[in-house]
Image (cartoon, rainbow, N blue to C red):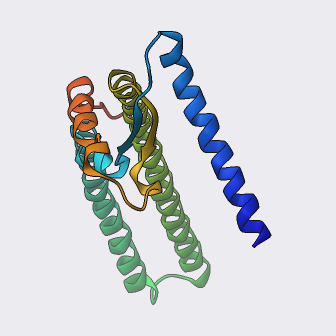
Amino acid sequence: MRWLTARSRALAGAFGLIAGLLLCPLLAHGQEAQGIGIIDAQRIYREATAVKSLQQQIDQQRDKFQRELREKEKVLRDADQELARQRAILSADAFNKRRKDLETQVSALQSEVRARKDRLDKAFAEGMKQVRAALIEVSREISEQKKLYLLIEKSSVVLVKPELEHTGEALKKLNERLPRVTLPAVQN
């Protein structure tokens, strides 16, 4: 019970600090803060046109890579089958050397797959960073316009009155401000 009390005090202190930081600019401008607002960031990330365009670009890059990968895998399968056919006519040393060369090529392809996946993930993260930055700007504007002293992410809230919800407005403003994110260059 002591832990819960200490945790509750810590959370209340953190919320108080955040509220104070948001309230200070409003009070400095002679405006009176009026309340709390809620934004569903997860919904915004699902529905924002910028995120959809980013995901579409990632999917196109992934599809292109999958086509290239299938071609390379076919070449390696054909080489493996050819090596299996030649096993009877090759010396043990020649067979082992070719088998080792083939395994090296397979290993190199696996490394390439991991590297490309990492580059795609990094490019997506960079694009999402732009979306998050724009959403923060939009949220700040809504907070100032509505004279809110606290704007909370919906996943942190159990119950909320619909009039406190500003997700639709935030989504609309985000789509206007950032309709598309261009995927950072993904090197092959």
Going 29% across and 31% down the picture, which residue do you hit? 181
Q: Residue furthest bottom?
A: 88
Q: Is residue 99 left or right of residue 171?
A: right
Q: Quadrant of the C terminus?
A: top left
The picture quadrant where one finds residue 163 is: top left
Locate the N terminus and report the quarter of the image it occupies.
bottom right
- Residue 56 lies, in percent from the top left, at 23, 46
Q: Nearer the viewer, residue 98 or 137?
A: 137
Where is residue 174 drawn, in percent x and y?
A: 27, 31
Q: Outermost residue, top direction?
A: 29
Q: What residue is rendered at 38% in x and 25% in y?
A: 147
> In the drawing, does residue 100 fall left or right of residue 64?
right
The picture places residue 38, in percent across and down from the top left corner, at 37, 44
12 in relation to 8, above or below: above
Q: Where 64 sits versus 100, above or below?
A: above
- In this image, 154 relative to 105: left or right? left
Give how far across and how far down residue 91 sits, in percent.
Answer: 56, 83
Q: How many marks?
A: 0
Residue occupying image coordinates x 47% and y 9%? 29
Picture quadrant where residue 17 is located: top right
The relative height of residue 12 versus residue 75 in the rendered view (above or below) is above
Q: Nearer the viewer, residue 167 or 120?
A: 167
Residue 188 can be seen in this image: no
